[in-house]
Image: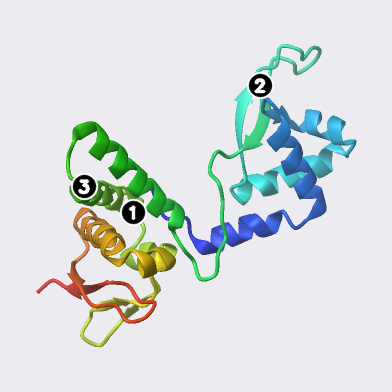
């Protein structure tokens, strides 16, 4: 599990502003099976080279994935080579300004509720546990701490003492209505992120200013 940077999500959604790319993406979304370049070109009555270029652009923007597979119906020269088949990615992509991570919060809370029901344990205990697991998973991306925090929408700023202030909250609307629950989740996530990433900081709870995060990262001394 990881943050999906705002820049990538905005670029992905913007890619579909092109009518041709939108047609290709919609065709593949409706297709019951992954489709080859030739199948897309034939179905949409478009030149193969044009379709190939647009398919690769959609892959680059994270909207499509591909696999190589031999097609039984292929005959003639080159029929033994596997075909490159395209399909939409399973992940939903959202773009918001400022960047928000509501889907991540929903995944954490849903897992915590499921475990609490199955294991008959307090929900807050499970929320903290799942949040820490998520933080460790994000740390595994091996991005720098600053990059990870930026990707997550925290807008980190370092002061003269070396502390990192998180000047935005990626769960802003949720925290405005459910502050205690969201701040518990966020504190545990960030604490595990720091520990697993061997970052020389500790997560310090703070009373957040309007729109800011409930955690400040202070240097280890």
- Up the image or down, 1 lies above or below 86; here it is below
Rendered residue at 55%/46% (across/down): 92
Q: What is the distance, in whole Å, between disc 3 and disc 1 at their CAs?
A: 22 Å
Q: Nearer the viewer, residue 2 or 161?
A: 2
User: Disc 3 or disc 1, which is closer to the eye?
Assistant: 3
User: Disc 1 or disc 2, which is closer to the eye?
Assistant: 1
Rendered residue at 17%/40% (across/down): 121
The residue tagged 2 is 82
SS label for mark 1: loop
- Up the image or down, 196 lies above or below 80; here it is below
- Up the image or down, 65 lies above or below 173; here it is above
Q: Nearer the viewer, residue 111 or 141?
A: 111
SS label for mark 2: loop
| Pointer 3 with pointer 1, Cβ within 8 A | no
Report whether 99 appears left or right of 34: left
Q: Position of residue 66 (x, y in %)?
A: 61, 34
Q: What is the distance, in whole Å, between disc 2 and disc 3 at their CAs?
A: 44 Å
User: Disc 2 or disc 3, which is closer to the eye?
Assistant: 3
SS label for mark 3: helix
Extreme residue in the bottom direction: 160
The residue tagged 3 is 129
In the rendered image, the quadrant that contains the C terminus is bottom left
Q: Position of residue 21 (x, y in %)?
A: 76, 48
Rendered residue at 81%/13% (across/down): 76
Q: Nearer the viewer, residue 1 or 130?
A: 130
Q: Position of residue 115 (x, y in %)?
A: 26, 37
Disc nearer the start of the sequence (1/2): 2
The residue tagged 1 is 142
Name which quarter of the figure residue 187 lies in.
bottom left
| Pointer 2 with pointer 3, Cβ within 8 A | no
Rendered residue at 19%/75% (across/down): 218
């Amino acid at each position: 599990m990881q943050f999906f940077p705002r820049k990538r999500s905005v670029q992905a959604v913007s890619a579909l502003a092109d009518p041709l790319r939108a047609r290709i993406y919609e065709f593949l979304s409706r297709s019951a099976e992954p489709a080859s370049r030739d199948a897309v070109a034939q179905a949409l009555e478009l030149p193969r080279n044009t379709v190939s270029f647009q398919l690769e652009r959609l892959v680059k923007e994270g909207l499509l994935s591909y696999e190589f597979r031999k097609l039984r119906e292929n005959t003639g020269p080159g029929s033994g080579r596997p075909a490159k088949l395209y399909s939409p990615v399973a992940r939903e992509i959202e773009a918001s300004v400022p960047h928000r991570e509501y889907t991540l919060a929903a995944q954490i809370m849903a897992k915590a509720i499921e475990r609490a029901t199955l294991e008959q344990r307090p929900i807050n205990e499970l929320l903290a546990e799942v949040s820490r697991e998520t933080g460790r998973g994000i740390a595994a991306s091996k991005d720098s701490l600053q990059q990870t925090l930026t990707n997550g929408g925290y807008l980190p700023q370092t002061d003269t003492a070396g502390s990192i202030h998180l000047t935005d909250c990626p769960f802003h609307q949720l925290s405005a209505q459910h502050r205690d629950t969201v701040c518990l989740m966020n504190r545990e996530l960030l604490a595990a992120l720091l520990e697993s990433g061997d970052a020389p900081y500790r997560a310090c709870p703070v009373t957040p200013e309007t729109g800011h995060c409930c955690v400040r990262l202070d240097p280890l001394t």
